[in-house]
Image (spheres, coloured by chain):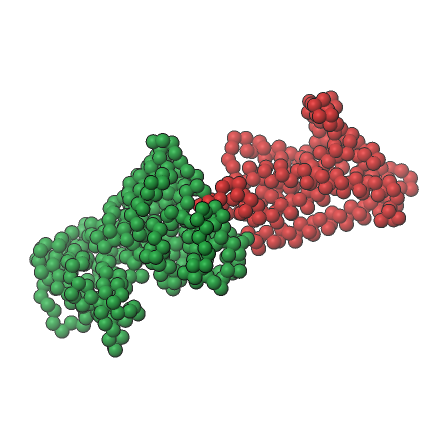
Chain colours: A red, B green
Amino acid sequence: MTDWLSPAEWQAVSLSLRVAFWATVLSLPVGIFTAYALARWSFVGKQVLNGIVHLPLVLPPVVTGYLLLLTFGRRGPVGEFLEQTFGIIVAFRWTGAVLAAAIMAFPLMVRAIRLSIEAVDPKLEEAASTLGASRAWVFMTVTLPLILPGILAGSILAFAKAMGEFGATITFVSNIPGQTQTLPSAIYVFLQVPGGEASALRLVIIAVVIAMGALLLSEVVSKRIAARVSA
Amino acid sequence: MTVSVQITHKQGDFILDVDFDAPDGLTVLFGRSGSGKTSVINAIAGLLRPDAGRIAIGGHVLQDSATGLWLPPHKRRIGYVFQDARLFPHLSVRQNLTYGQRFSATKAPIDPVVEMLGLGDLLNRRPAALSGGEKQRVAIGRALLSGPELILADEPLAALDEARKDDILPYFERLRDEVGIPIVYVSHAAGEVARLATTVVVMDQGRVKQMGPAGEVLSDPSVIPVGVREAGAMIEARVGAHSDDGLSDLLIGDLVVTIPNCGRQIGDLVRLRIAAQDVMIATQAPQGISALNVLPATIKSIRMGDGPGAMVQMEVGGATLLSRITRRSVQTLGLTAGQKVFAVLKAVSVAR
C-alpha cells in the first residue's frame, strides 16, 4: 500500500480513516440516545431537537463549519471553556476534524437507528417488564438486540459520510497536511497543483471503493432488520 | 390468596370504576369488548396507572393511592399471558422461557413446565418458526417461570382458530387445577367462561355488573353479558357410563343426561354447557319425542325481556338451568315460579 501511495497520499488516507473511526465511535452513544428519545419519548421541544439534529444535512457544509469555528474556535464560548478548563483545543487539530465529521454524519446515524427503534414493538418491552426486567434491562436485553442491525447500518453510513466530509472540515480546521488534511481535502489540493492528477486519481479510487463498500454493507445489514424484528 | 382490586380511572369519556375480589382458582373478567376488562388487568400488571385505587395480592400491596404506593410492572411478580403471545423474536424458545427466571427469587426448574406444556421439541426453535398455538404455550410457560404470585391472561385464545383453542384450553385447566397460582382471565366467549371459570366477574361499561361463583353467575337470567344467543347455564356432571352406540350417560345429581361420547373416564367430573336457546319447556312429560334428555324441573324465576323473549330459570337435579322461550309461550302455558315442568334439552355439550 505504501509503495503504491506516496507518503503524503498515505497520510491523508490514514488520517481520514482515523477521523471517520473516532467520529463514528464517539457519536454512537449520543446517536442511540437521541434516536431513542425521538422515537419513544414525547417532550417539549422534540421538533426543535429533531430540527437541530437534521440541520447539518440541509445547511451548506461551509455554514456548519463556520458555526463550529464560532463556537469551538479558540475565541468561541465553548472552545475557550475547553481550552481553559481541560487544555483541549479542537480548532485546526485532527480532533476538530473528528468533531466536524461527527456532526455532519450525525443525522444519517440517528435516522437509521430511529427507524429501527420504531420497528420494535413497544408491547415486547411491556412483556419484558411484566417478567421482572427493569427499564435498563429491557433496553439491554430486548430493545438493543433488536435494533442492532439498525445501529450497524447507521454506523456504516456515518463512517462513510465522515470519510468524505469536506466543506465543514476545511472551514473549521483548515487543510494542514498530517493534521487536518483528510482524503477529500488532499484530493482538492492535488487538483490545484500541476501534475497532481495522478495522486488525486489514486485517492479518488480509494474514496469510491470505501464509499461503495460501505453502502453495500449497509444495504445487506438493513435487509436483515426486517427478517429479524418481524416474527 | 385473594386478589383484591378497587380502582377508578378516567380515559377520555370512558370511566373505569371497579371493585372486586378474585379468590383462588380462575377468575374470568367477562364482558363485551370495550367494557374495560383489559384496562383492569393492565392496571393489575402495572402497565396502566389508574387515577386512584388499591390493588393487592393477599397482603402484598401493589398500588394504594391512599399512601401513594405504586409499584412498576417489573416489581410486581405477575405473569402476563398476552393475546398476541409477545415472544421475543431474537431469542430461542428456551431463552424466552428462562427470560423471567433471573428476576425471580424462587428459580422454578424449567423441566416440569416444559413437560406440562409439551414444549420439549420446541426449545431450540425461534418464535418465528412456531404456530399460533405453540407460541401461546411458550408464553404461558414464560409467565409461569417468572415465579409469579398471580397470572393474568388477556383473551389468550382470541387470536387462535377453533382447533387451536381446543389445544390450549386444557393447559389453562391444568394451570387452574394443578399449579395453585390465582389466575385472572379476560374473555368475552361464554364457552370459555363455562369451561374455565371458578369465579366470574361480569363487566359492563367500566363497571362490575355482577360477580360470584361461575355456576351461579352463568345461570342468573338477569346477567346476559354478551347477548342472549350466548346465554346458557354451566352444570357440573359426573360421567356414569359409556354405551356401545357412541353415547355417554352423565349424572347431574340423580338425573341422567345422555350426550355423544365425551371421551372422558367414568367417574370424571365434566362441565356441561347448556345454551338457553337449546332448552324447551313442557308442562307434561312429552311422548314420542326424539330428544333424549327430558328432565323434571322446577321453575325458579321468569324474567321477561324487552322484546318477544323471556328467560326462565329452572332447578334440575340440584343444578340451575336457563331456558329462552317466547313471552307468548310463557302466557299460553301459564308458567309461574314454583311450577313443576319438564325441561327438554335439544343439545348438551361438554363445555369448551
Image height check: is B117 above or below A157? below
* Residue appearing at x 32%, y 57% in the figure: B177
In x, y percent, where is residue B215? 23, 55
The percent coordinates of residue A147 (x first, y second) are 58, 47
Q: Nearer the viewer, residue A148 or A115?
A: A148
Residue A1 shows up from this direction: yes
Among the 4 quarters of the image, the one containing residue A49: top right
Residue B239 on image: x %, y %: 24, 67
Q: Residue at x 31, y 39 (%)?
A: B6
Q: Residue at x 25, y 78 (%)?
A: B244
**Image position of A64 with respect to B18: above or below:** above
Toward which corner of the image does residue B75 lie, by quadrant?
A: top left
Residue B263: % across, % down: 30, 70
Residue ID at (16%, 66%)? B255
**Residue B84 shows in the view:** no
Numbered marks: total: 0
Q: Is residue A13 left or right of residue B140?
A: right
A228 horizontally vs A96: left or right: left
B268 or A165, which is in the foreground? B268
Q: Is residue A165 above or below residue B152?
A: above
Q: Residue furthest bottom?
A: B244
Q: Nearer the viewer, residue B238 or A41?
A: B238
